[in-house]
């Protein structure tokens, strides 16, 4: 077993421990018999644990990708239902932070993708949006340019000009990120996952921009 295998095994163990912590936090917060002095602090602690867990999942996914062990399971999904599930997963933390999170999507819109992988990309984008937004996060999806685009945007200050554009899945970590808190790992992971969704002549990608429906940063996941 080489070091990368040992690292992957350790990450898996840490992820399992964090999962146990998160489950206990969920039970503690949901139990009406527990009188937490400051529920907001408990929610923020829960959010930080989820963020670390998300990073570990990204590392494991990239490890599997690098070792040709990652299986992409594409199926058809209703986007309104999918975005509603994303909001439900993040609603409690957003409430604790006084952030409004909502979605905009046609009820009959469908798309083909790996739901778990795309969920990880959107979770990362929502986590970033929570840190930089003033008060609103918007999830949306639409058919554009003969493909599906899913957007996560906020009403914060937006991305610095040097980050605007399409992320290169082969060299995203070589782009200029110094002085920016948005995670390099998250962008690299998202670009890789987008590129795994492909047809015979098209490939998914990540685009960063400012000022779509809201004035802040907007991450676009384009899928063929």
Image (cartoon, helix red, strand yellow):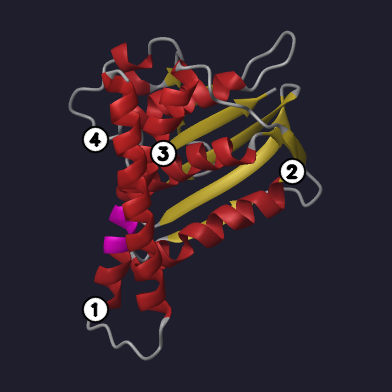
User: Which range is magenta?
Assistant: 45-49
CB-based contact (under 8 Å), mark 4 and mark 1: no
Q: Relative to 138, say whether 161 is above or below.
A: above
Residue at 47%, 25% (x, y): give it.
64
User: Above or below — where is 2 with respect to 186?
Assistant: above
Distance Cα–Cα, label 3 vs label 4: 19 Å
Residue, disc 2: 77
Q: Position of residue 154 (x, y in %)?
A: 43, 46
Q: Is residue 150 left or right of residue 105?
A: left
Instruction: Please identify the residue farthest to the bottom as the structure is shown.
Output: 33
Distance (Cα) linking label 2 and label 4 = 32 Å
- Give the quarter of the image for residue 47: bottom left
Snapshot quadrant of residue 24 = bottom left
Q: Earlier in the sequence, mark 2 or mark 4?
A: 2
Pointer 1 residue:
38
Give the answer, above or below, for where 180 lies relative to 4. below
Q: Quadrant of the N terminus?
A: top left
| Dot in front, 2 or 3 | 3
112 up-or-down from 161: above or below: below
Residue depth check, mark 4 versus mark 1: number of the one nearer the observer: 1
Distance between the Cα atoms at labels 1 and 3? 29 Å
């Amino acid at each position: 077993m080489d070091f990368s295998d040992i690292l992957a095994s350790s990450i898996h163990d840490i992820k399992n421990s964090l999962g146990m912590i998160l489950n206990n936090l969920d039970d503690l917060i949901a139990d009406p018999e527990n009188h937490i002095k400051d529920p907001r602090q408990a929610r923020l602690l829960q959010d930080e644990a989820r963020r670390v867990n998300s990073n570990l999942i990204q590392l494991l996914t990239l490890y599997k990708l690098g070792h040709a062990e990652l299986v992409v399971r594409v199926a058809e999904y209703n986007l309104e239902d999918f975005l509603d599930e994303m909001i439900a997963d993040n609603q409690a933390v957003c409430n604790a932070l006084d952030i409004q999170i909502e979605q905009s999507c046609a009820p009959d819109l469908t798309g083909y993708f790996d739901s778990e992988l795309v969920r990880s990309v959107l979770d990362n984008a929502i986590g970033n949006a929570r840190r930089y937004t003033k008060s609103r996060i918007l999830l949306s999806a639409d058919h554009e340019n003969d493909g599906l685009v899913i957007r996560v945007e906020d009403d914060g200050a937006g991305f610095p000009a040097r980050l605007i554009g399409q992320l290169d899945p082969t060299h995203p970590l070589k782009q200029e990120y110094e002085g920016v808190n948005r995670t390099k790992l998250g962008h690299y992971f998202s670009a890789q996952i987008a590129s795994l969704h492909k047809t015979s002549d098209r490939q998914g990608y990540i685009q960063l921009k400012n000022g779509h429906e809201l004035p802040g940063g907007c991450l676009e996941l384009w899928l063929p």
